[in-house]
Image (spheres, rainbow, N blue to C red):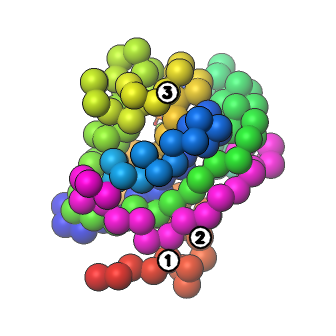
Amino acid sequence: MGIERTLSIIKPDAVAKNVIGKIYSRFETNGLTVIAAKMAWLSPQEAGAFYAVHKERPFFKDLVAFMISGPVMVQVLEGESAIAKNRELMGATDPKKAEAGTIRADFAESIDANAVHGSDGEETAKNEIAFFFPAMSVYSGR
Ligand code: RTP
Ligand code: MG
């Protein structure tokens, strides 16, 4: 595995709850370092393009509507096995099924308003990071 980078989004529900710091703390105490970050309010086009892989799914319209309902906090996380580690910290997509102590179990409301996004593999991580951040704006301290 080794050191990886992954894209994380704190979704509009968690931004509205004022828990960006609490979620960052989960990352930092579990070996993930924030190496790029920005706040954004996505347009319908941007949210649709980001989740294009789901465009034929029945929940796509609701997913886009939710992702544009308020600002999001977008970050690149770096660390040992960062992609799987972030998914583990996030918990299951449906917060009702998420393990206790995970971000979704603690901060998410529903399968739609589920607090965070995380890349699900090496290829998606690379593409999703490039979607939000030009290479020159990602600063690793290591
Ligand atoms: P994400 O991409 O946001 O990190 O979430 P995920 O990998 O855990 O789940 P994914 O399958 O990629 O789905 C993306 C988002 O779509 C919504 N969803 N709704 N109603 C449904 O059955 C359903 N399934 C997925 C969720 O908000 C999920 O985060
Ligand atoms: Mg996903």
Q: Quadrant of residue 17?
A: top right
Question: What residue sits right under mark 1 in the picture?
Answer: 138
Q: Are marks 1 and 2 in contact (CB under 8 Å)?
A: yes
Task: Give the quadrant of the C terminus.
Answer: bottom left
Task: Give the quadrant of the N terminus.
Answer: bottom left
Identify which residue, 46 or 55, lies in the foreground.
46
Which amino acid type corresponds to the residue marked 1 in the rendered image?
Val
Identify which residue, 122 or 14, lies in the foreground.
14
Q: Quadrant of residue 137?
A: bottom right
At a point 70% along the width and 47% down the height, the residue shown is 71
CA separation, marks 1 and 2?
7 Å
At a point 47% along the width and 51% down the height, the residue shown is 21
Question: What residue sits right under mark 2 in the picture?
Answer: 133
Establish whether ligand 1 lies closer than 8 Å to the Cβ of label 1.
Answer: no
Q: Can residue 125 be seen in this view?
A: no
- Callout in the foreground (2, 3): 3
**Does residue 119 appear left or right of residue 29 in this picture?**
right
Dot 3 surroundings within 10 Å: few (below 14), some, or many (20 or more)?
Answer: many
Question: What residue sits right under mark 3 in the picture?
Answer: 108
Considering the numbered disc 2 on the image, is that residue within a helix, a strand or a loop?
A: loop
Q: In which quarter of the image is residue 51?
A: top right
Dot 1 surroundings within 10 Å: few (below 14), some, or many (20 or more)?
Answer: some
Q: Farthest residue toward the top? A: 96
Which amino acid type corresponds to the residue marked 2 in the rendered image?
Phe
| Highlighted magenta segment, given as a residue range | 28-47
